[in-house]
Image (cartoon, coloured by chain):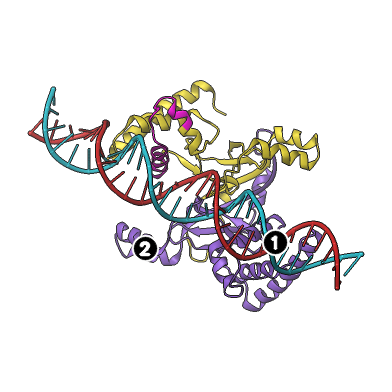
Chain colours: A yellow, B purple, C cyan, D red
DNA sequence: CTGACGGATGATAATTAGTATCATCCGATA
DNA sequence: TATCGGATGATACTAATTATCATCCGTCAG
């Protein structure tokens, strides 16, 4: 977990890198794009497009949801953000570009960044890949967060399920 | 890759296990369900719901797509199939219940089962999990298959992209 | 500073991939 | 064989994207 000061410094660096990368790719640096990446950098919650849209509307009341979707896709394409689809849910976005993995709570869908040492080593060993040439990998750890562990312990399974059903829409990946 | 004889034996065992598990869970064993799991067992391609629907319609011309979706969800819920969502795409399904991982071609979306030795070991080490209690994990290896490697080598990137765009619909997860 | 150009945007429609509803059917059991 | 609880099929609906197009605007050359 990065300290707040560190986070702000990281965000400034990233905004500068973003602008530079856009120019290198011949893409205009628009105020909408800056706001969207800023919102993403400010969030450690791996937000969905709808959540980023809600944030950015505070600054750009007329921004279109389609712009947010397009921009998030552009950010991922140029390597300034990563798409996360844990638990077969709809797309969430991650501004943290340092190598890491995710742990996700199967109940409340909260995501945290984790670093698993040595996972690259496992792939250095010969793995039979049927002629495929590896390019990258993702790893997702499914878990229960502390809050949901407490909830689970304090009532019957049905009550737990009821809590879950009330608190979260489905976020289906569709 | 399992031999064809082995595959048939595995399928028979699995159908029996499926029926037993349904009865244990108080779920009727309907002809539709049997056809759907048979179609899944017969496929090593990790098919999408639409593909399974196409297969099953040959035997049950009046089956509803909603039934296929519901049944696939049921199969996953009772542990008789697994949902796969590689490359942030829509859901695909896997009848192979033995522990394994997936390698997926980023171009043609072909999936192969792989077994990565020692990957469990990585989690035996202390990983800082912010209080989360781990329940499971998934690992996805992105790669280029042999066919797509050859295509990549024989023409410009745009031509490759054109081939891809023609051959595959988007399969978006949404 | 200005005009031109190519890409972005906003509004809206469309698409895809599911999920919900409900009348009727049917698998399982006593 | 009758009953009951869950399944199905048809259809409507929803969520999450993507496409379309007229207009706007960021960037750059002059």
Please state the horizontal and vertical placement of residue A134, each as a whole percent of the image: 48, 56
Mark 2 or 1, nearer chain start: 1
Left or right: residue B107 compared with residue B154: right
Label 1, secondary structure: give it: loop
Image vertical order of residue B42 relative to residue A93, above or below:
below
Front-most of residues A39 and B153: A39
The numbered disc on residue B166 is 2
Please state the horizontal and vertical placement of residue A21, each as a whole percent of the image: 33, 37
Q: Residue at x 63, y 45 (%)?
A: A141
**What chain does mark 1 sit on?**
B
Q: Residue at x 49, y 37 (%)?
A: A50
Q: Is A18 covered by the magenta stretch?
A: no
Magenta residues (range)? A54-77
The numbered disc on residue A98 is none
Front-most of residues A94 and A6: A94
Q: Residue at x 65, y 35 (%)?
A: A167
Q: CA distance from mark 2 to mark 1?
A: 34 Å
Left or right: residue B155 compared with residue C26: left
Question: Is the stretch drawn in magenta largely helix, strand or loop?
Answer: helix
Image vertical order of residue B73 relative to residue B11, above or below:
above
Left or right: residue C16 compared with residue B138: left
Q: Name the residue carrying label 1.
A: B80
Residue D11 lies in quadrant: bottom right
Please state the horizontal and vertical placement of residue C5, each as a whole percent of the image: 17, 42
Q: Is A71 covered by the magenta stretch?
A: yes
Image vertical order of residue A85 relative to residue D5, above or below:
above
> Callout 1: few (<14), some (14-19), or many (20+) C-alpha neighbours within 10 Å?
many
Say which quadrant the N terminus of chain A sits in. top right
Please state the horizontal and vertical placement of residue B153, each as a whole percent of the image: 34, 63
Image vertical order of residue B95 relative to residue B84, above or below:
below
> Callout 2: few (<14), some (14-19), or many (20+) C-alpha neighbours within 10 Å?
few
Please, which residue is most extreme toward the top here? A5
């Amino acid at each position: 977990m990065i300290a707040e000061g560190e986070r702000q410094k990281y965000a400034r660096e990233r905004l500068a890198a973003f602008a530079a990368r856009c120019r290198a790719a011949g893409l205009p640096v628009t105020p909408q794009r800056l706001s969207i990446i800023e919102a993403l950098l400010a969030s450690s919650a791996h937000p969905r497009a709808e959540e980023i849209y809600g944030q950015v509307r505070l600054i750009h009341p007329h921004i279109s949801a389609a712009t947010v979707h397009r921009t998030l896709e552009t950010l991922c394409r140029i390597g300034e953000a990563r798409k996360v689809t844990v638990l077969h849910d709809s797309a969430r976005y991650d501004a943290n570009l340092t190598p890491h993995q995710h742990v996700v709570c199967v109940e409340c869908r909260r995501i945290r960044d984790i670093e698993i040492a040595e996972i690259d080593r496992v792939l250095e060993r010969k793995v039979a890949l049927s002629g495929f040439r590896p390019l990258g990998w993702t790893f997702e750890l499914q878990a229960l967060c502390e809050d949901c562990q407490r909830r689970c312990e304090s009532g019957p399974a049905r009550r737990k399920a009821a809590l879950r059903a009330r608190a979260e829409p489905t976020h289906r990946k569709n």
